[in-house]
């Protein structure tokens, strides 16, 4: 038997060879398709997904609160009577004439998890160029973030490192999105949740103060 016949006997049939290569190509295609449909999670992707879920969670809570009937209240004397002598129109100064001086400790408002505005004590810190910080007890009381609650309330949108909030300390803190108002000026900012080491509930940073300064506000010494 010639060597050419021996080589032919050792070589696999053409159909079998094509089938093997077809299986290999199909496996490679399926692997690429799976990776395309299931990309590996990244920190930014996870942050955006968590932020979206938190926003949907709080929007649904706010919708439920809005559907509740408003509490009934007693009418004030002469209310709705249309008698201008008993209820004359009152002069309201324009917004431009409002007081533009801010105190170092200022009463502000924060929007809670049910879309209601609540007051809080804030310390204005011009040396804080990083971000606004909330006390954990305040964040839990407003139903914005509470690691003990479980569910969406316990999931931060990101994490950050705070330095100098407590002198000589550096802490890793969760970050959430909050809505707040200072003198009728409303802001939506990313805020850290961390112990502040003082009586204040909020530490306002330059992320809020800079726009206020640009609007003409100044911090008074009083």
Image: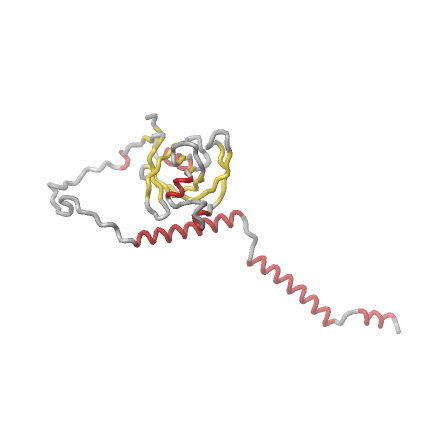
Say if 173 sits above or below 48 in the image. above
**What colouring method underlies this structural image?**
secondary structure
Place of residue 50 in the rendered image (x, y in percent of width and height, measured from the top left): 47, 50
Horizontally, residue 29 falls left or right of residue 151, namely: right
Res 177 visible: yes
Q: Which of 98 and 118 is in front in this view?
A: 118
The residue sitting at the top extreme is 221
Res 185 visible: no
Say if 151 sits above or below 186 in the image. below
The residue sitting at the bottom extreme is 1
The residue sitting at the front extreme is 148
Query: Residue at left 40%, top 42%?
Result: 139
Q: Which of 116 and 47 is in front in this view?
A: 116
Query: Residue at left 33%, top 46%?
Result: 116
Place of residue 201 in the rendered image (x, y in percent of width and height, measured from the top left): 38, 36
Horizontally, residue 114 falls left or right of residue 31, namely: left
Query: Residue at left 39%, top 46%?
Result: 143
Quarter of the image that includes the C terminus: top left
């Amino acid at each position: 038997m010639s060597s050419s016949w021996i080589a032919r006997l050792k070589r696999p049939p053409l159909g079998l060879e094509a089938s093997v290569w077809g299986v290999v190509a199909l496996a490679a295609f399926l692997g690429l398709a799976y990776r395309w449909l299931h990309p590996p999670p990244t920190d930014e992707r996870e942050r955006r997904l968590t932020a979206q879920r938190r926003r949907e969670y709080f929007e649904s809570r706010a919708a439920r609160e809005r559907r509740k009937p408003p509490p009934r209240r007693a009418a004030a004397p002469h209310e709705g009577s249309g008698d201008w002598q008993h209820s004359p129109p009152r002069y309201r100064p324009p917004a431009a004439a409002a007081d533009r001086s801010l105190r170092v400790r200022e009463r502000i408002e924060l929007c809670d998890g049910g879309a209601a505005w609540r007051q809080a004590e804030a310390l204005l810190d011009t040396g804080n160029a990083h971000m606004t910080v909330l006390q954990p007890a305040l964040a839990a009381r407003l139903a914005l973030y509470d690691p003990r609650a479980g569910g969406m309330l316990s999931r931060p949108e990101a994490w950050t490192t705070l330095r100098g909030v407590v002198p000589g300390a550096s802490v890793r803190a969760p970050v959430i999105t909050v809505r707040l108002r200072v003198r009728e000026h409303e802001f939506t900012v990313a805020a850290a949740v961390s112990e502040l080491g003082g009586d204040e509930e909020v530490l306002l940073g330059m992320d809020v103060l800079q726009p206020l300064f640009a609007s003409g506000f100044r911090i008074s010494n009083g």
